Image (cartoon, rainbow, N blue to C red):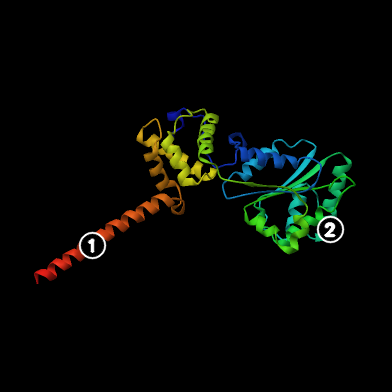
Amino acid sequence: MYQDYFGLSEKPFSIAPNPEYLYLSERHKEALAHLTHGLGESGGFVLLTGEVGTGKTTVTRCMLEQVPDSTQVAFILNPTLSELELLASICDELAISYDSEKATLKVLTDLIKARLLDNHQQGRHTMLIIDEAQHLAPQVLEQLRLLTNLETNHKKLLQIILVGQPELQTLLRRNELRQLAQRITARYHLLPLALTQVDAYIKHRLKVAGGRQTLFDKGAVKYVHQLTGGIPRLINLLCERALLGAYSAQVNHINKRIIVQAACEALPETEQSLPRQQGRYWRFIFTLGGIMMLFALGIGLSYII
């Protein structure tokens, strides 16, 4: 609706994890470097964590584009599985045939290990990526650790990348998972964007979509950062609505007023902490003023009587 109006080739603030729109802040560059380390031959576990919407999945997909053809990748998106279901999902991802009626933990584990050995003998690397890994049960994580027991004198035959929210770090500190925690060769935690990075982020996405990078003025950018806390997904939601609002108002740039209106329409109430606090403040002032007026009026009436 607004793309032609602003000269955009596509929507610049889609929440889909499109690697083409990945803005590599310094933190994201470091995160990508840590994941790229997983493309090597060291094996073991790599851990990437971050708050909801900070770009973990997008960074992971960007890393996948750099995976060489000699690497076979299994990507698990729904980790709320039992041990048997997880092994079956890994077999499905690695195109390993099995009889579902006769599948047991031992049968599936043996099939996966046979594939790992076969890939190694053919000079191939095997990688398992699990998104939303904070939902993994401890016994399932232990099953993953057992899969990494297969190794040569120089490396483990399976690289596992765990991607999840900060709760994953807490989960891995549990005593029964200490053996797995000791096998994590790289850890990285993604943080929200700072104000200057939010400005660069918005300009980057507008540029990729073919638009003007000065579409948002400084006041608008500052308020976007204030309302979203620098979370990329929330920035996308807010800026998408702001573009639609500017188009509806037939204005060619976005200021703070448009961002305020967009926030009321696009962001959950819990994210609009500043406006809500301001609203509470003024409601308190008006209420207090009304009480004082009634109190004064009551004193005056008492005096007259």
Q: Is residue 233 above or below residue 211?
A: below
Name the spot of residue 234 as percent of width and height, x first: 50, 45
Name the spot of residue 64 as percent of width and height, x first: 70, 39
Q: Name the residue located 43 percent from the left edge and 42 percent from the top edge.
A: 223
Name the spot of residue 149 as percent of width and height, x first: 84, 54
How far is the residue under mark 1 from the one under mark 2?
78 Å
Chain-order first, disc 1 or disc 2: 2
Please tell me which residue lies in front, 117 or 190: 190
Q: Which residue is mark 1?
A: 292
Type of the residue with mark 1: Met
Q: Is residue 11 visible?
A: no
Label ID, residue 80: none
Q: Quadrant of residue 261?
A: top left
Residue furthest left in the image: 304
Name the spot of residue 274 as percent of width and height, x first: 41, 50
Q: Which residue is mark 2?
A: 107
User: Left or right of 4: which side holds 250?
Assistant: left
Q: Name the residue located 81 percent from the left edge and 54 percent from the top edge.
A: 147
Please tell me which residue lies in front, 283 or 234: 283
Type of the residue with mark 2: Val
Residue neighbourhood size for the residue with mark 2, other residues' Cα within 10 Å, grouped as few (<14), some (14–19), many (≥20) = some
Q: Name the residue located 40 percent from the left edge and 48 percent from the top edge.
A: 264
Determine whether the residue tagged by mark 2 lies in a helix, strand or loop. helix
Residue neighbourhood size for the residue with mark 1, other residues' Cα within 10 Å, grouped as few (<14), some (14–19), many (≥20) = few
Q: Nearer the viewer, mark 1 or mark 2?
A: 1
Determine whether the residue tagged by mark 1 lies in a helix, strand or loop. helix
User: Left or right of 14: which side holds 117?
Assistant: right
Residue furthest bottom in the image: 305
Q: Quadrant of residue 67?
A: top right
User: Left or right of 195: which side holds 101?
Assistant: right
